[in-house]
Image (cartoon, grey):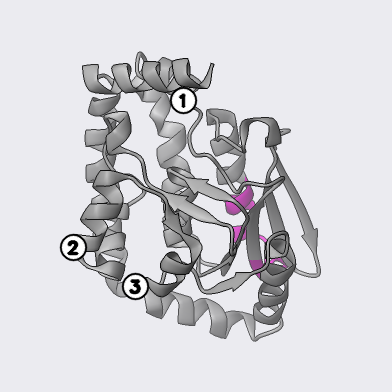
Amino acid sequence: MSEFVTESIESGIQYICLNRVDKKNAITLEMYQALTHALQSAQSNAEIKASMIYGAGPDFSSGNDINEFLHIAQTPDKMEAIMAFLQMLTRYQKPLIAGVEGRAVGVGATMLLHCDMVVASRHAKLQFPFVQLGLVPEAASSYLLPQLVGHQKAFEILILGDFVESEEAKAMGLINHLCEPGEAFKVAQRYVQKIAALPVEAVSLSKDLLKHKAQDNVQMALMREGRIFKDRLKSKEAYQAFSSFLSRNK
């Protein structure tokens, strides 16, 4: 487990925390590997009935670490760690609940599309800024988002990359429940505890029934996005966008 991804297990519930507060929980390759390992271990552990993911500090996650992406662009094979996590996330069989405070950006937003329930603070904001970075959507968001909100709205969200406020995200079905700022962990925990108290096999089978029909389309979207995303990392547009982003942050 990475020092920036912590895990605890309590009463049959796995709690996964993105814990890189000084970088707004930006996700590194090492963190992807830790997240994959956490889900894999929970999948094979009969004592774990459900999982919950949340971010330490005021934000859920600012997405991928852009500094690392500049290096990945030179060695795109390193993207395998990211793809391994996304594969695990999309195939995870147990209930996965998210507690979201503040900003959920990039993969911090797209991973929520694969969670079974999302609880978010009223101050939460979702952003999918892939095109602004010279990239394309990932984590099968090019398939899942239009299914939820329709083509036109998905186009606006994914192409313009503006923040989606929590109230709008809830109205579109991206968030289940809103809560007061600072309460996302506690409210999400309440829901995951209710789920963990239900008959385990019935919950797992029901989740499979809900996701089964779309699973092939999700996997195809994931693979197609991954190939294009990998190529885009080497593009001039992406390099210029990354450099501009880093210079602004400095």
Determine which of the numbered discs, if any, sits on residue 66 in the image: 1
Query: Which residue in the structure is indicated by mark 2?
Result: 151
| Label 2 – label 1 distance at C-alpha | 28 Å
179 left or right of 36 in image: right
Front tag of 3 and 2: 2
Which sits in the foreground, 230 or 156? 156
**Up-down relation of residue 235 to residue 86 (above or below):** above
38 left or right of 219 in image: right
**Up-down relation of residue 84 to residue 47 (above or below):** above
Which comes sooner in the sequence, label 3 or label 1? Answer: 1
Query: Which residue in the structure is indicated by mark 3?
Result: 212
Q: Is mark 2 on a helix, strand or loop?
A: helix
Front tag of 3 and 1: 1
- Contact (CB < 8 A) between labels 3 and 2? no
Three-letter code, disc 1? Ile
**Residue 48 lies in quadrant:** bottom right
Q: Position of residue 82 (x, y in %)?
A: 44, 37
- Residue lying at 69% horizontally and 31% vertically, measured from the top left: 22
Q: Residue lying farthest right? A: 10
**Around disc 2, counting alpha carbons within 10 Å, would you say few (fewer than 14), some (14 to 19), or many (20 or more)?**
some
**Up-down relation of residue 246 to residue 134 (above or below):** above
